[in-house]
Image (cartoon, grey):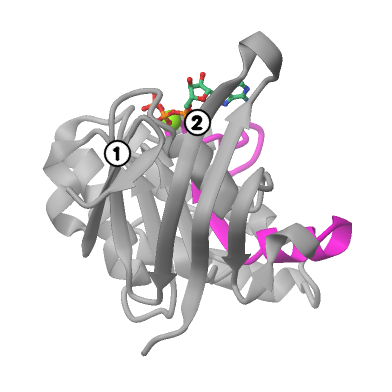
């Protein structure tokens, strides 16, 4: 059996209190293992992004158990939480690249502050990652000059350059046309397969569901097999 990268048991989460209280996740139980590429679908407001923030150790669940990369998230604070987050890669709907940096600098920035960071090695890793996403030779360009699809591929390179054990993508194709959207997801699938990592991608995009190895559906905070 491959290693368990994330384990959720009866996870519940909500926001607000009193009359404004809203329960967003209910009894979510899920295991993620190396090789999983999960497409997470569900209506707007069903809790997909909230689940991704839990999987990213960006918040702690109110109820239930959450283990990420062998650690109980509830027992972690400060540095340990930071170290855990550095082993997780994120790709968002909008790329959030820094316009003032070149393409390669955007990817490299993900490596800054890593233990043992070394400028020459970071540059080489960033350039290799750009090559892998089909942007070899474009590293010196101004980020703003790239097309939307190219910028999202830079975002994929930035998320993967640290070789994360868990990759979380929140509607990564939402701002792209069908063809470039599928290309971005295909890249994500190709670059993570055989890497001992798991990917969870929240998506409304029917055209890339076939690229996933597993599908999960969220309805009103409850996770279902579709
Ligand atoms: N920080 C927050 N504070 C209060 N309510 C929140 C917060 N984050 C999310 N919610 C609420 O939780 C519910 C689920 O939101 P979530 O963003 O997880 O849905 P989603 O499935 O990702 O939707 P979409 O497909 O539109 O992105 C929504 O009703 C939202 O308003
Ligand atoms: Mg969302």
- 27 in relation to 157, above or below: above
Front-lying residue, 187 or 120: 187
- Given residues 102 and 29, the one toward you in this image is 29
Q: Is mark 1 on a helix, strand or loop?
A: loop
Residue drawn at x 21%, y 36% is 205
Residue 140 appears in the picture as rendered: no
Around disc 2, counting alpha carbons within 10 Å, would you say few (fewer than 14), some (14 to 19), or many (20 or more)? some
Decide if ligand 1 comes within 8 Å of the CB at mark 2: yes
The residue indicated by pointer 2 is: 24
Q: For residue 210, what is the image quadrant?
A: bottom left
| Residue to which mark 1 is pinned | 203
Which range of residues does the magenta coloring cover? 76-102
The correct choice, above or below, for 6 with respect to 41 in the image is: below
Which residue sits furthest front?
18
In percent of width and height, residue 109 lies at 68, 53
Based on the picture, tell me whether residue 96 belongs to the magenta stretch. yes
Residue at 64% over, 9% down: 19
Say which element carries label 2: strand
Write the residue at 41% across / 38% down. 48
Crowding at dot 1, Cα within 10 Å, few <14 / some 14-19 / many 20+, comes out as: many
Q: Residue 83 lies in magenta, yes or no?
A: yes
Quadrant containing the N terminus in the rendered view = bottom left
**Res 25 visible:** yes
């Amino acid at each position: 059996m491959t290693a368990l990268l994330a384990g959720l048991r009866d996870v519940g989460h909500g926001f607000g209190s009193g009359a404004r209280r809203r329960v967003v996740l209910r009894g979510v139980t899920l295991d993620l293992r190396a090789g999983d590429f999960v497409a997470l679908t569900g209506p707007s407001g069903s809790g997909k992004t909230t689940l991704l923030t839990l999987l990213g150790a960006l918040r702690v669940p109110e109820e239930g158990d959450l283990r990420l990369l062998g650690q109980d998230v509830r027992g972690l604070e400060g540095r340990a939480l930071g170290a855990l987050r550095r082993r997780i890669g994120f790709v968002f709907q909008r790329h959030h690249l820094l316009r003032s940096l070149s393409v390669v600098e955007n990817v490299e920035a993900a490596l800054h502050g890593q233990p043992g960071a070394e400028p020459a090695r970071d540059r080489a890793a960033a350039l290799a990652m750009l090559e892998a996403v089909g942007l070899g030779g474009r590293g010196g360009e101004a980020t703003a000059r790239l097309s939307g699809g190219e910028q999202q591929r830079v975002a994929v390179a930035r998320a993967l350059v640290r070789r994360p054990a868990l990759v979380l993508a929140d509607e990564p194709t939402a701002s792209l046309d069908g063809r470039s959207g599928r290309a971005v997801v295909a890249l994500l699938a190709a670059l993570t397969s055989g890497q001992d990592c798991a990917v969870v991608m929240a998506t409304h995009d029917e055209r890339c569901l076939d690229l996933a190895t597993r599908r999960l559906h969220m309805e009103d905070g409850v996770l279902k097999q579709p």
